[in-house]
Amino acid sequence: MHYKKNTGLIKIKSIINKFLILIIGFILSGLIWIIEAIVHTFIFSYNNNFWKNLLFPNFYEFWMRFLIIMITIFFSFYCQKIISEKKKKAKEFKNIFNSIQDGLSILDKDLNIINVNSWFENNFNLNIPVIGKKCYSVYQNRTSSCPSCPSLLTFKTGKKENNLILLNSEMKDMKWIEVSSFPVKNKNGRVVNVIESFKNITETKNTQEKYKELIETSIVGLLEYDLVQNKIAFVNPKLLDILQYSEKELEEDSIFQKIFDIEELKIDKKDRNGSNLELKIISKGGYIKWLSGKKIYNYNNKGKIISLRLWLVDITEEKLHEKLKTEFLTRTSHELKTPLISIKGLTDLLIKFHNKEFDEDILSILKGIRKGCLNQIDIVDNLLKAIQLEADQLRLYPTRGNLSLIIKSVIKEFEGLVKTRNQTLTLKIHNQIITKFDKRKIKEVVSNILMNASHYTPHYGKITVISQIKNNHVIINIQDNGIGFTKKEKELIIKPFGKIERYGKGWDIDSQGTGLGLYISKKITELHGGEIWVESKGRDKGSIFYISLPITK
């Protein structure tokens, strides 16, 4: 391609060029001197002796000739400077041209190569001159232009054109090239040249091929929906297998809308980064299937959403197992609760109507049986609530009310328990906390956490309830100076059956319960759009439970 130049030879040529310009200046000056002598001798006849006029001019002629010679020499140096500056600018342009990381090629209207940068030297293994050659001959070993040549399109349209081409020439680890053609127009707006930009995307293309292979063989279903053209842009074999439709069948809008609930796929402006979702669909065979996954939005360079991508897995079998488990636990819980209610009812009758027939020992046993039944009924009720929450079957009935009254009523109910444990309970809440909530459910939440604080705080301990209004939320802090929680215990305590055993540790606490209370409280709070969390600096450093609820009208 003849890119490499001998730098030493270039310097010698530069010196010779400067010297030649100087010599030419002196030669021109000499010629002017001779012409001046000829003019004065033969035209103006100042002196008929040519040699005398040439060698011994008079004072006036000498200075005139000298001035003309100086102007000529100055003009020669000035021309030399202009030429030097132009060469310098040309060199700077060439350096910039060659330093561009992508390939650049300038073509004329006949697709002849006018110039190329050094990118071609670094990426091609051609040893022939390319200047003046046809671009398709050099790059593609063709005898005619490529069918989808972007440069030809640019000459026709006068606009930038792009194309992805597979080069056939000998390359250095290069195969796929992204070609962009830019028009160069004259004063009349006519395209006279085209600048081609070449970008090596072989590595990117290979990576895409690998990802495509992974997607094609993935056990996760993938679907991309074009929101501009309102059609499916891509669907992988796994999702086709789940849906039991062919790719061609899915191209019909009616089929797509039959499978997917469009409302569930609508764009959520609050979640521009996508979100998790769970879908119930109807397969081709008419079967209900459950899919779980994530929806992701794709944007153009203006920030507008142009497509929706769904990553989905079939969880129908898991859903069936969950349903069977829920039904089993619900039935079992009811079966357990029925005899407990009967035992409690009969015990109440004996205590109320036949207490005179029993001595104190028998009455004490009956009261113990009644208390045990109540505890077991509470456990079964909590188990049923946990099952309902897990299956999204628990319903809220929110109404507008004063949360302060609910908290105060719970505190009043706990006065007896607090006194028996000689604990101090302090209340620091707003008199009016008006919001919308399910009164019975939120009362249960506050009761569970206050019970937890009392149980895990030794006798003579302190419990404080504080309210805060922050960022349109009310935050209830229930603080205690009890035994506190380790980092691991904080993670465990809000999980189902996350009971922390305290027996035999020497702590003066009451650790009764199933470990479902805080889990139920957390789920109920989340259904209200709030959250629960716990903070503790460690063992014997107390804890703070936070209940955050949105203030809604």
Image (cartoon, rainbow, N blue to C red):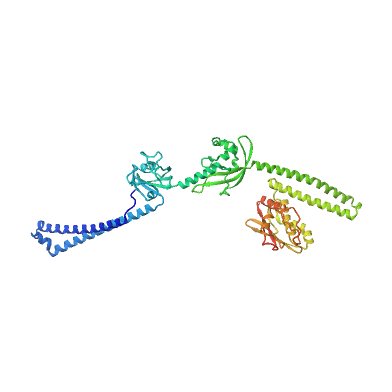
Residue sitting nearer the eye, 159 or 135:
135
Residue at (70, 53) in percent of width and height = 498
Q: Residue furthest right?
A: 357
Q: Nearer the viewer, residue 200 or 466?
A: 200
Spot the residue most to the left. 48
Q: Where 247 sits versus 381, above or below?
A: above
Q: Residue at x 36, y 42 (%)?
A: 137
Percent across and percent down for residue 47 are: 8, 60
Residue 515 visible in the displayed image: yes
Hey, which quadrant is residue 143 in on the image?
A: top left
Near-viewer residue (502 or 196): 502
Query: Residue 300, percent across and down?
Result: 50, 47
Count of numbered marks: 0
Most foreground residue, 153 or 525: 153
Camera sees residue 400:
no
Left or right placement of residue 434 versus residue 122 in this view = right
Left/right of residue 303 with respect to residue 18 in the rendered view: right
| Place of residue 58 in the rendered image (x, y in percent of width and height, measured from the top left) | 12, 64
